[in-house]
């Protein structure tokens, strides 16, 4: 992501990674995997392959996977039985080809390519130090610090150099890397972002989510563990755990919104979890109504759970046009308003004269909810009750989910009652933090050792925000609620 030497408000990484070891159609499989992971990044994609003679081949482009890799000539330019790929999601900053991953570099030990999902929180500090000692950065992504740290490491093996680099970075990362000797996967010591391992007859697959294993008919083997590095080569797979302190702090927002519903994360199916959150929400904040209507697509499973638990019929009262991107992609507020209209339409036949429970997964700026409530009222709804399948988003994410800075988060500035007024709903309720943990199979949130990273709801940042805390003024502006 854009990472000038001095100031950058915030990185905006939300990415998907994929890797294959030993399959004759490695590039095609990677393109399919990236297609299944398209929801994790729609801005750009890239694939790096390694052929049997030891040469690397790269193709990157801006846009959707199908547009970049749908061309037979492009695919023919990516020979080899090993590959890694990356989907990038950036909503602000430079959309330049030089920032598209995987990043590739020629080192003393040969070629090396890396794809990163997550955000580093000390990349600014590291980059300044690296530039001072002569490293020439080619991109403005935080991920490039991995490349330079590996290049300057005094260790001799690729694995030791990678470990050396990982010990210097702070933040969230799930990595896939490719070098002449093999495919590598790595997860940060808190396991914030996902990474799974799959088996493909004689080969192996690494992917951000299991939905990308399914599309290539790979068999799910297991999640890569927090702080684990897996090294895959022709002799098999090896696991290395170089960190003494690891914990489970998997991103809870992956369950709520980000992951595809058919994925299974850390042993828990995302779809079931979303339905359970909806049921929990119905128990916590019941209201008399005629229909339960999801804000599609992200609100659908939670609305189903809500409807079953409450006994109120589930109806598709809002229809989504699938041919526009996520509203967040629109860069300005004005366009974002327009974006919502482009994306959602009211189904008057379902809404007219009805008391409606609207279910969505989150309120970030509040723009979507406000427009949707207004649209549902215009379609004749008698009452509109908004139910949200996450707790109020009161803090920004610094670990890989794109959220605006705190001052733009509706819940950072207003209580629930005020928010209800602002979005124009008759009532508004969010699932409680404990309710969310219950839906995830816990008894509630253990504040001494929460099983997940829930900083966006609690402000409990488990990984230091070094790039921000280093600079008091930036820290102030990033963490305060009112701009
Ligand atoms: P807002 O209009 O800012 O309140 O946005 C809320 C909507 O954006 C919800 O319907 C979510 O499904 C969706 N959403 C939440 N988080 C994100 C994100 N990080 N990126 C894109 N969309 C999001």
Image (cartoon, grey):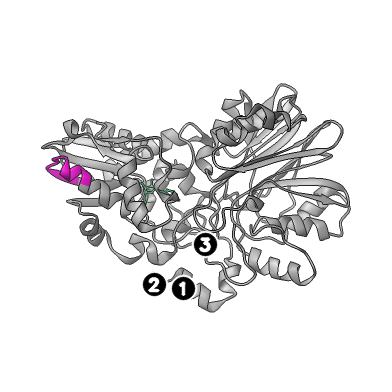
Can you give x and y, in whole percent of width and height, for residue 20 in the image?
70, 33
Q: Which comes before the other along the chain, label 1 or label 3? A: 3
The answer to whether 102 appears left or right of 162 in the picture is: left
Spatial CA span between label 2 and label 1: 7 Å
- The answer to whether residue 295 of the structure is visible from this angle is no
Which residue was labeled with disc 2?
483
* Magenta-drawn stretch contains 89: no
Judged from the image, the secondary structure of the residue bearing numbered disc 2 is loop
Measuring 36% from the left and 49% from the top, which residue is drawn there?
A: 362
Spatial CA span between label 3 and label 2: 21 Å
Q: Which comes before the other along the chain, label 3 or label 2? A: 3
Can you give x and y, in whole percent of width and height, for residue 290 in the image?
16, 35
Measuring 68% from the left and 27% from the top, which residue is drawn there?
A: 199
Q: Residues within 10 Å of mark 3 (few under 14, many from 20)?
A: some
Judged from the image, the secondary structure of the residue bearing numbered disc 3 is loop
The answer to whether 106 appears left or right of 312 in the picture is: right
The answer to whether 131 appears left or right of 234 in the picture is: left
Which residue was labeled with disc 1?
477
Quadrant where the C terminus lies? bottom left
Q: Residues within 10 Å of mark 2 (few under 14, many from 20)?
A: few
Q: Which mark is residue 461?
A: 3
Per the rendered image, the range of residues in magenta is 375-384
Can you give x and y, in whole percent of width and height, for residue 246 in the image?
64, 53
To which quarter of the image does residue 125 belong?
Answer: bottom right
* Magenta-drawn stretch contains 379: yes
Q: Are marks 2 and 1 in contact (CB under 8 Å)?
A: yes
To which quarter of the image does residue 281 belong?
Answer: top left
Measuring 52% from the left and 43% from the top, which residue is drawn there?
A: 42
């Amino acid at each position: 992501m854009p990472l000038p030497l001095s100031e950058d408000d915030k990185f905006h990484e939300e990415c998907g990674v994929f890797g294959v070891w030993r399959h004759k159609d490695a590039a095609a499989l990677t393109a399919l995997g990236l297609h299944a992971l398209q929801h994790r990044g729609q801005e750009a994609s890239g694939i790096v392959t390694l052929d049997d003679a030891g040469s690397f081949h790269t193709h990157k482009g801006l846009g959707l996977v199908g547009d970049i890799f749908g061309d037979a000539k492009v695919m023919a330019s990516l020979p080899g039985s090993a590959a890694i790929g990356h989907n990038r999601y950036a909503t602000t900053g430079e959309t330049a080809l030089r920032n598209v991953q995987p990043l590739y570099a020629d080192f003393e030990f040969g070629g090396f390519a890396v794809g990163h999902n997550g955000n580093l929180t000390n990349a600014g500090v590291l980059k300044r130090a690296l530039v001072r000692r002569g490293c020439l950065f080619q991109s403005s992504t935080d991920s490039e610090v991995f490349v330079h740290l590996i290049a300057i490491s005094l260790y001799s093996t690729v694995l030791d150099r990678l470990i050396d680099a990982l010990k210097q970075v702070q933040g969230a990362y799930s990595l896939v890397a490719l070098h002449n000797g093999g495919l590598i996967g790595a997860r940060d010591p808190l396991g914030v972002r996902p990474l799974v391992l799959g088996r493909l007859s004689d080969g192996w697959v690494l992917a951000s989510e299991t939905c990308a294993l399914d599309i290539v008919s790979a068999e799910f083997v297991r999640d890569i563990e927090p702080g684990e590095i897996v090294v895959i080569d022709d002799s098999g797979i090896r696991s290395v755990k170089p960190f003494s302190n690891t914990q489970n702090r998997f991103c809870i927002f992956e369950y709520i919104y980000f992951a595809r519903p058919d994925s299974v994360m850390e042993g828990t199916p995302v779809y079931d979890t979303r339905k359970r959150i909806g049921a929990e929400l119905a128990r916590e904040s019941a209201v008399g109504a005629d229909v339960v209507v999801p804000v599609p697509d992200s609100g659908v499973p939670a609305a189903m759970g809500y409807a079953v638990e409450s006994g109120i019929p589930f109806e598709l009262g809002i229809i989504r046009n699938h041919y526009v991107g996520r509203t967040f992609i629109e860069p300005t507020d004005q366009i974002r308003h327009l974006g919502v209209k482009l994306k959602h339409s009211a189904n008057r036949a379902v809404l007219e004269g009805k008391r409606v429970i609207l279910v969505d997964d989150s309120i970030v700026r509040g723009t979507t909810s406000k427009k949707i409530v207004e649209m549902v009222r215009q379609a004749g709804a008698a009452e509109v009750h908004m139910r949200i399948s996450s707790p109020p988003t009161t803090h920004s994410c610094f670990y890989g989910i794109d959220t605006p800075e705190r001052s733009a988060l509706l819940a950072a500035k207003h209580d629930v009652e005020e928010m209800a007024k602002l979005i124009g709903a008759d009532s508004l309720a969010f699932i409680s933090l404990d309710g969310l943990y219950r839906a995830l199979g816990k008894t509630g949130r253990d504040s001494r050792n929460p099983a997940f990273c829930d900083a966006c709801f609690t402000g409990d940042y488990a990984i230091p925000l070094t790039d921000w805390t280093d600079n008091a003024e930036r820290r102030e502006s990033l963490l305060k609620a009112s701009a």
